[in-house]
Amino acid sequence: MTEQGAVAAGEPADQGWQRLHPLSPLLRGGVVLLAVLGYAISQLVDTLFQSFEPGRFIPGDVADDTGGRAITAHPVLALVALVVVLAAVGGVSWVSWRFSRFRVAGGQVELRTGVLFRQHRQVPLERVQAVETTRPILARLLGLSQVVVQSAGGSDSHLTLAFLGADRAEELRTHLLDLAGRADDRGAPQHAPGAGVEVPGAAVDAPAAGAARRPDDADPLVTVPNGRLFVATVLHGSTIVLGILVVGAALTVGIAEAGLEALAAAPAMIPVVFGLAASRVKEMLVHGNFSIARSRTALRVRHGLTDLRVATVPLHRVQAVEVLQPLWWRPWGWWRVRVNVAGVKAGADGDDTETVLLPVGTSAEALAVLSALGAHPEDPVLLEALHGDGGEPGWTGPPAGARWLDPWSWRRTGYAVASRALYVRKGRWTRRAVVVPHARVQSLALRQGPLQARLGLVSATVVSTPGPVDASVPHLDAARAEDFLEVVGDRAREARRLVGAGGPADAAPDLEPLAPDPTGLVD
């Protein structure tokens, strides 16, 4: 990604440059317009209600009114002020749209913006991690979408084209994925079973109107019903703890007294309940209407109730996979699948919209997603990682002394080294199974705290790209931790040598679909 503070004067205005949709200014200034209209309406409603209070309002007398009442007492002035503000917002938005242009040419995506302070942003196609389309609620009403080009520099270097027509956005997304895929093909060999070989040719600057689309919109691999998502969203640790506290108080002091105490404590509980409800509603809005489909080299994820998002997860960018099951999901057999993706990380506020491949699904659906990543649904090591309780052959775990630091799950914790991947499992209340292909291991580390030092224990960590998946193995015996470092390190070096002759681990797509001779997560 490169940025320039100004664009050289005198450059041709055409050469493939295209404008965004003419309705883009309306969406860009939509929030401001709604805020202004909301304020004006609230003032009018407030004036209307105050006019019915005896002794508070005398028509024509505004001597005791302050700012907001003074202006709303003169409808003409209020209307003129509203028109001026709306015109200013609309004018600024229109000028911003007028000087915003983009193009796809010369092996990169370019975007020019700004009037006084001009900016020229470029994303080389070989640095493109993924391309997704998003449709906020206002954009959906107008039939528009925005295209987000995700580059290897992280979220700060993403390029957003807001807004385009929905069909045009899909054509551009497909076109960019084709070009970025060809760039990846030139940069690293492809080994997808049954995949066709594309002949390199001249890059096309822009997709032709009405051109045939690449068949990546296959039938959904998994579709999550909104009813199941609602139940799973409510069955969260915070809501369960809050419910237990309320029930416990009722049983302790009596239902009648508990009701009175609850009313007295209601003001103090409002922020807690509001924050809890906001987080649960946000998760429902983000993951609603969830479906995932498999294309030749990527997974395509659709989700969102109000803000519809279509994201593409290239298989060769997946670095680690985690399948987890909270205790309260166990009676239903539900699981969640998360991944670490090169160039993508969960937000600081816990936003995981780009790293969740299955928000809640059955065991069969979770295995279907893992199969799309290359795992065999009947792989015994994988099944032991999901359902095992400890003591299975081939698994190495903490010694009995670890029960002092982890009395509940030390027996289940452990790792298994297969020919192509490392399997890690841990947790008894919230079961977690992690799969890291050897070629994706970035580095290894051993850590020892003061209590671990007294017990002769060491925690081993597999360092992956930033993301929600943690591939650490806690509380190993010191000797076994050193063996872990040696064995996994040797497998990682050998895997990188085989897939890319010493190239970077994210250059070779070894996460591939199931085949008679599969490569990827399976042994």
Image (spheres, helix red, strand yellow):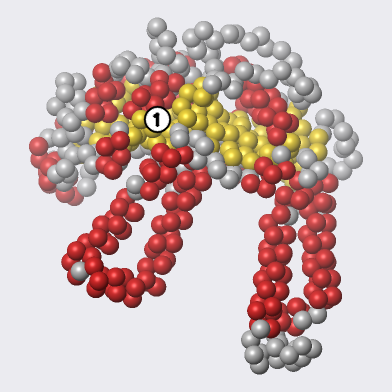
Residue 392: x and y in percent read: 16, 23
Residue identifier under label 1: 320
Give the left or right position of residue 136, taking residue 421 as reference: right
- What percent of the width, then of the height, locates residue 499? 44, 15
Residue name at image x 34 percent, y 47 percent: 235
Q: Please indicate whether residue 4 sits to the left or right of residue 177 in the image.
A: right
Q: Is residue 219 left or right of residue 204?
A: left
Compare residues 326 and 344 and report the one nearer the observer.
326
Residue sitting nearer the eye, 152 or 325: 325
Quadrant for residue 13, please give it.
Answer: top right
> Label 1 sits on what residue type?
Ala
> Where, quadrant-wise, is the C terminus in this rendering?
top left
Residue 488 seen in render: no
In the rendered image, which quarter is residue 167 located in? top right
Q: How far from the left and from the top, in percent, is residue 264?
A: 33, 76
Residue 197 visible here: yes
Q: Estimate how packed mark 1 is, as few (under 14), some (14 to 19) or many (20 or more) residues with alpha carbons within 10 Å.
A: many
Quadrant showing the N terminus: top right
The residue sitting at 29% across, 26% down in the picture is 423
Q: Nearer the viewer, residue 219 or 32?
A: 219
